[in-house]
Structures are given as C-alpha cells and as structure tokens.
C-alpha cells in the first residue's frame, strides 16, 4: 500500500472516531419542569451553545421531551425534530411580538409549510434584552424511537415565519 493510501486510510479512521466520540447522549431523567420561559438550574440535563443559540433539553419520560431555546435575536426562532436538515423535520417556529406567535411546520426540501399534525404540548415564549427564549414540552414519541434524536435549530432577524435564517445548526443525540 502506498504511503498516500495509508495516510488517507488513517485520516478517515481518525475523523470517523472523532465523529463518534463527539456524539453526545441525552439520558432519560424522569420528573417535570416548570414551563415558564426560563431554564432554571437543575431543570435540564443537556446543554449546547453555538452560533448564538443555547439549547437545553430533558427527556421527561418515554413520550415527552422538554426544551429551552435561548437565541440572541428579536426575530423568529425555530427548532426542528426528526431530521438534521429541514427536509422531513417537524419544525416549531415562532417569534414574540407583544405576545407569542408560533406555528408547527413540516420541512419539504429546503422549504417548510404549516401542518395540522401537532406535537407541542405546552410552551412559553419571552423576549427580553435582545434574546428570544422559548421553553416547551413536546410529544417526542416519533422522534426518539430510533435510539437517537436529530435536531435542527435556526433563527432570523424578522418577526415573521417566512424570512430566511441568519444562522442554523444541527445535531444528533444518542438516547441511552
């Protein structure tokens, strides 16, 4: 085997190992949270922060997932479940304009449209000091059955449900 092939093989193995090590877990933590728009200390057992998006999660039981999305924007925020891309994701998208305005959408290729299929059980959205904070509980049954949870997160600068995102990211969590 040539040195170049050995180098490429070792590099690919190293990258694959890093990817597997980087996947984080979201264990079940039975109990409840107070849905008030604020992630209180000890309420969540998973936290991630990147691209001005703070995400806290907690699996309350086999069918319910709590989330807290804190984003540095006064525009719209979104969290999508079931896909690492918009296509196929069940998306909660909303903004605060003297009161919360939100809808549930489904991703179709690189677009999304309103759906009558609901997963949001309860939520509170607040806006203060340049941040939008959305806390809620969803019926997570169909998003967690594979042993992993795929998510997309995004935000925009406008108070509407259709403008293009300023930033987005995706992640996958193992469900032990």
Image: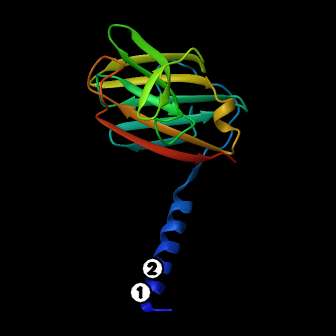
Q: Residue 157: x percent and y percent?
A: 26, 26
Depth order, front residue of 91/56: 91
Q: Residue at (45%, 43%) from the top-left corner?
A: 170
Q: Secondary structure at mark 2?
A: helix
- Residue sticking out furthest to the top: 98
Q: Which residue is mark 2?
A: 8
Do labels 2 and 1 touch, CB within 8 Å? yes
Q: Which residue is mark 1?
A: 4
Q: Residue 103: x percent and y percent?
A: 47, 16
Question: Which of the 4 quarters of the picture holds residue 4?
Answer: bottom left
Position of 105 with respect to 145 (left or right) is left
When the figure is inspected, residue 3 is found, relative to residue 104, above or below; the finding is below
Q: Residue at (31%, 31%) from the top-left corner?
A: 72
When the figure is inspected, residue 73 is found, relative to residue 97, above or below; the finding is below
When the figure is inspected, residue 154 is found, relative to residue 148, above or below; the finding is above
Depth order, front residue of 114/48: 114
């Amino acid at each position: 085997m040539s040195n170049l092939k050995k180098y490429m093989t070792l590099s690919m193995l190293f990258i694959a190992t890093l990817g597997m090590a980087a996947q984080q877990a979201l264990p079940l933590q039975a109990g409840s949270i107070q849905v008030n728009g604020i992630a209180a200390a000890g309420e969540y057992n998973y936290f991630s922060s990147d691209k001005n998006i703070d995400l806290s999660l907690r699996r309350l039981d086999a069918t319910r997932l709590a989330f807290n999305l804190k984003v540095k924007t006064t525009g719209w925020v979104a969290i999508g479940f079931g896909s690492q891309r918009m296509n196929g994701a069940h998306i909660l998208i909303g903004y605060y304009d003297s009161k919360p305005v939100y809808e549930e959408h489904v991703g179709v290729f690189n677009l999304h449209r309103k759906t009558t299929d609901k997963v949001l059980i309860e939520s509170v959205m607040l806006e203060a000091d340049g941040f939008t904070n959305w806390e809620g509980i969803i019926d997570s049954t169909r998003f967690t059955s594979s042993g992993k949870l795929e998510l997309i997160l995004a935000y925009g600068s406008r108070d509407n449900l259709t403008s293009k995102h300023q930033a987005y990211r995706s992640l996958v969590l193992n469900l032990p």
